Image (cartoon, rainbow, N blue to C red):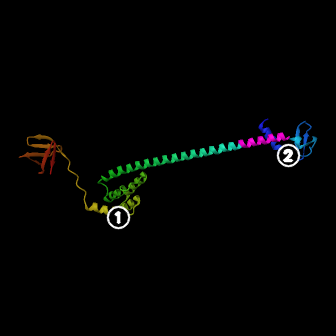
């Protein structure tokens, strides 16, 4: 017998099992219905005993079906709970993997930004057309790496727009997060003003043509050699190494 039919029988049987009598009703169309009260309308009523309505064997079968169904429901619920736990573990693993990848990407970006900052600082430190206070402020900022490229670029722009050393010192302190940067930038600016920049070395002279004891370099300067001594046309003493001429 179909399990659903048995279960339906069980659901019908137990509410009626507690009554002493039940009624079997046959409608004018021939349909049979069961009720715990006399049939209404034009139905034919037959009074029957409870054990005639659903036998003990049928009740036992219905209870077995109900027990099996309950066991199946428990099994399905258990599998569902296990599946949900597995799904939660997978989602947690995915979340950890995403977080780790985000950390790796952030570290990579920070390293790239620091490399950019180092390159920029190295390039800017060689500029001689920049105000001394601006260079001092940049030195302070470059000494404390800023992983955020946009923030570093913003600091450079602010320094370029500043009109005096005090403003640049404050900007350096803001960019580095160190209030002591103000005093260091101002002190560095004063030292640089007291110590002028060293003169750029003179360009190297390359001998291009010689006629006896007289030679000329690429700029047209003349060099005369007498008694083993070479003198340039401006009176400076020189010595030659290969094609290069070095003068005092």
Residue at point 37%, 51% (across, down): 117
Picture quadrant where residue 23 is located: top right
Pick the residue in front: 122 or 85: 85
The N terminus: image quadrant = top right
Pick the residue in front: 189 or 29: 29
In the image, residue 234 lies at what x, y percent? 13, 50
Q: Which residue is the site of mark 1?
A: 183
Residue at point 13%, 47% (across, down): 239
Secondary structure at numbered mark 2? helix
In the image, residue 182 lies at what x, y percent? 36, 63
In the image, residue 241 lies at what x, y percent? 15, 44
Picture quadrant where residue 198 is located: bottom left
Q: Residues within 10 Å of mark 1 (few under 14, many from 20)?
A: some
Pick the residue in front: 201 or 18: 18
Q: Residues within 10 Å of mark 2 (few under 14, many from 20)?
A: some
Q: Is 118 one of the magenta-colored residues?
A: no
Residue at point 12%, 45% (across, down): 222
């Amino acid at each position: 017998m179909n399990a659903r039919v048995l279960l339906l029988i069980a659901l019908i049987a137990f509410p009626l099992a507690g009554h002493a009598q039940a009624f079997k009703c046959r409608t004018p169309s021939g349909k049979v219905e069961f009720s715990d009260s006399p049939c209404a309308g034009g139905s034919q009523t037959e009074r029957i005993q409870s054990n005639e309505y659903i036998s003990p064997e049928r009740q036992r079968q219905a209870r077995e079906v109900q027990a099996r169904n309950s066991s199946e429901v428990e099994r399905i619920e258990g599998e569902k709970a296990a599946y949900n736990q597995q799904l939660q573990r997978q989602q947690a693993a995915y979340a950890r993997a995403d977080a780790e990848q985000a950390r790796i990407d952030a570290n990579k970006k920070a390293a790239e930004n620091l490399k950019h900052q180092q390159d920029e600082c190295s390039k800017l430190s060689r500029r001689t057309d920049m105000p001394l206070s601006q260079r001092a402020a940049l030195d302070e900022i470059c000494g404390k790496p800023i992983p955020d490229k946009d923030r570093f670029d913003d600091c450079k722009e602010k320094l370029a727009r500043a009109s005096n050393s005090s403003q640049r010192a404050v900007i350096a302190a803001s960019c580095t997060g160190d209030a002591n940067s103000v005093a260091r930038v101002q002190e560095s600016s004063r030292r640089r003003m007291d110590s002028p920049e060293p003169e750029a070395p003179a360009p190297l002279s390359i001998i291009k043509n010689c006629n006896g004891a007289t030679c000329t370099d690429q700029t047209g300067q003349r060099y005369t050699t007498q008694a083993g001594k070479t003198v340039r046309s401006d009176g400076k003493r020189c010595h030659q190494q290969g094609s290069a001429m070095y003068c005092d």
